Image (spheres, rainbow, N blue to C red):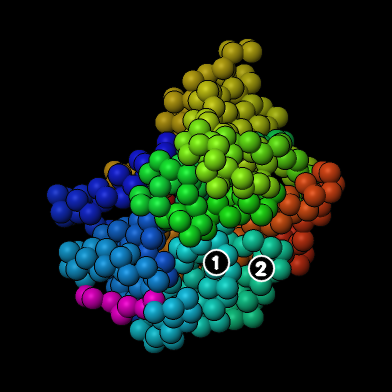
Amino acid sequence: MTSRRNFVKTTALVGAGAALLPNLSFGGMLSSDGQKLKLGFIGVGLRGTNHLNNALHRKDVEITAICDIDPNRISIALDKIDKAGFKKPEVFGSNDYDYRNLLELKNLDAVIISTPWLWHTRMAKDAMLAGKYTGLEVSAANTLEECWDLVNTHEKTGTHMMILENVNYRRDVLAVLNMVKQNVFGELVHFRCGYQHDLRFVMLNDGKTAYGKGVEFGEKGISESVWRTQHSVLRNADVYPTHGVGPIAAMCDINRGNRFVSLTSHATKSRGLHNYIVDNGGKDHPNAKVNFKMGDVITSTIETANGETIIVTHDVSLPRPYSLGFRVQGTKGLWEKDGDRIYVEGQSKPHRWDESKAWLEKYDHPLWKKYGELATGAGHGGMDFFVLQAFVESAKQNIAPPMDAYDAAAWSAITPLSEASIENNGQPQDFPDFTRGTWIKRNPYNWMKDSY
C-alpha cells in the first residue's frame, strides 16, 4: 500500500473481482465439527468493510451479525452481503453499547472489531467475556491498564484474542522472516521500523469525503478525522506502533524466548498539521488556533532481553512518501526496505549492496507461494487475505492465534511508555512482562508453515 486512496480503490475492486472471478473463493475446510464459523463484525467502516469483503469470499464462514452506529455503513455492508449470496445478518447499532447485545447471540463464534481506538480494549474485553473468539484491529490498547486488561481477560476466560496486524503478512516481510529463520543474516543485532505515512489528508478533510481535501476534524470531520485527530491534539506519543514493530517482534521471538525490556522516546516540535491547516484553510480558520501536542516525528528505542535494539519511528504529519522504514541487521548482513537492498557477507560483493529482488524471490515465503495469486486484490497488497485466513483458521480450531493477547499488549504498550518517556525528557521506561515470566519457556510460533 502506498496510500489510503489505493486502499479505498482496492476495497471497491474486491466486490467486482468476486463477480468477474467467481471461482476465487477460499476456506474450503470447515471447522472440526463440520460447521461454518459464525462470524460477526463490530464496526463496518472502511477497515471493517475490507475484512467483510474478504470474508464474503470464504466458503467456511457465515456472517451472522454486524454492528455499526452509522446507518450508512450498515446499508453498505448489507448490500455487499446480499450481493455475495449470504443470508441477511442480524443488525445492531442503535447506540454505542448495542454491540453488547450482538455478543449475547448464541449463533456467533467469533467477532472482528474495527472501531476507533478508544473502543478497542473495552470491546475486546466484552467479546472475550462473552466467549467469542476475538479479532482486534490495531492498535489494541491505549494505556498500560488496557494492555493488562487484554491479558487478564484472556487468562480469566480462556478465550483467545488475535491482534489483526496485517503487515506481518507482507510478502517482503515474510521473505525476510524466512531469511532470518534460515540464518542468512546471522545472529540478530539491530532493527529499525515504524509508521511513516503522510496522513494529513486523513486527519483533516472536508467533512464530506473520507480523504477529501479540507481542514476539518472532530464533529465537523468524517471517517477517521472524527476521532483520530484528537489523539494528536491531546497526546505526545507513538500512537500507532504495531505496523512496524509487529513484524520485528515475530523475527526476534518477542514473548517467546525474548521480550521487550525498556524504551526511551523523544519527540520533535509539532508543525505539520498546523501548517497544513493554514495552507489549505487560511490562517483565520478556527482550526489554525488548535495546539497539536503530538510531535511530528517521534523516535523510540527499545532494548530486548536478548540484547537487540529496535528503533521505532512515528511520522504522519509531514509531507513524505509512505514507508515503514524496515531494517533487519545481524552479524552476517542486513536488509533495508528503503532502497530495496540487501547485503550478506561472503555472498554480496564487498561493501556493495545487492538489489533485494533476487533475494526476496529466492526466499519467498511458503504462504505466498501457495496463496499469492489468490491474495491479489484482497487489500493492502494481499496482506489482508493472510491476516483473515490466520484468524478464521485459528478460530475454527479454537487455538491460540499467531499474534495473541500477550503480543497485543506488548506491542501496544509502546504508546503509553513513549508518552511517559517523552514527558520525562527521554527517561527510560520499563516494559511490563505481560507473560509473567513465561516468555522464557514459551515456544516461538511456527511462522514458516504454509497453511496460515
Observer able to see residue 290: yes
Write down the region rendered in magenta. 87-93
Quick one: label 1, few (<14), some, or many (20+) residues within 10 Å? many
| Viewer-nearest residue: 167 or 59 | 167
Left or right: 202 in relation to 25? right
Which quadrant would residue 406 be assigned to in this image?
Answer: bottom right
Quick one: label 2, few (<14), some, or many (20+) residues within 10 Å? many
Amino acid carrying label 1: it is His
Residue at 73 percent of width and 50 percent of height: 418
Per the image, the residue denoted by label 1 is 120
Residue at 59 percent of width and 22 percent of height: 343
Q: Where does residue 269 sit, x and y in percent of width and height? A: 71, 37
Badge 2 marks a residue whose secondary structure is helix
Disc tally is 2
Residue at 43 percent of width and 74 percent of height: 110
Q: Where does residue 156 sit, x and y in percent of width and height? A: 64, 81
Q: Where does residue 391 sit, x and y in percent of width and height? A: 44, 63
Per the image, the residue denoted by label 2 is 146
Residue 13: which numbered mark, if any?
none
Label 2 close to label 1 by CB (< 8 Å): yes
| Viewer-nearest residue: 305 or 299 | 299
Q: Is residue 352 above or below residue 240?
A: above
Quarter that holds the N terminus: top left
Q: Is residue 397 above or below residue 366?
A: below
Q: Where does residue 203 sit, x and y in percent of width and height? A: 50, 47
Query: Counting residues from the N terminus, which is met first, the one under dot 2 or under dot 1?
Result: 1
Quarter that holds the C terminus: bottom left
CA separation, marks 2 and 1?
9 Å
Residue at 15 percent of width and 54 percent of height: 19
Q: Is residue 447 magenta?
A: no
Badge 1 marks a residue whose secondary structure is helix
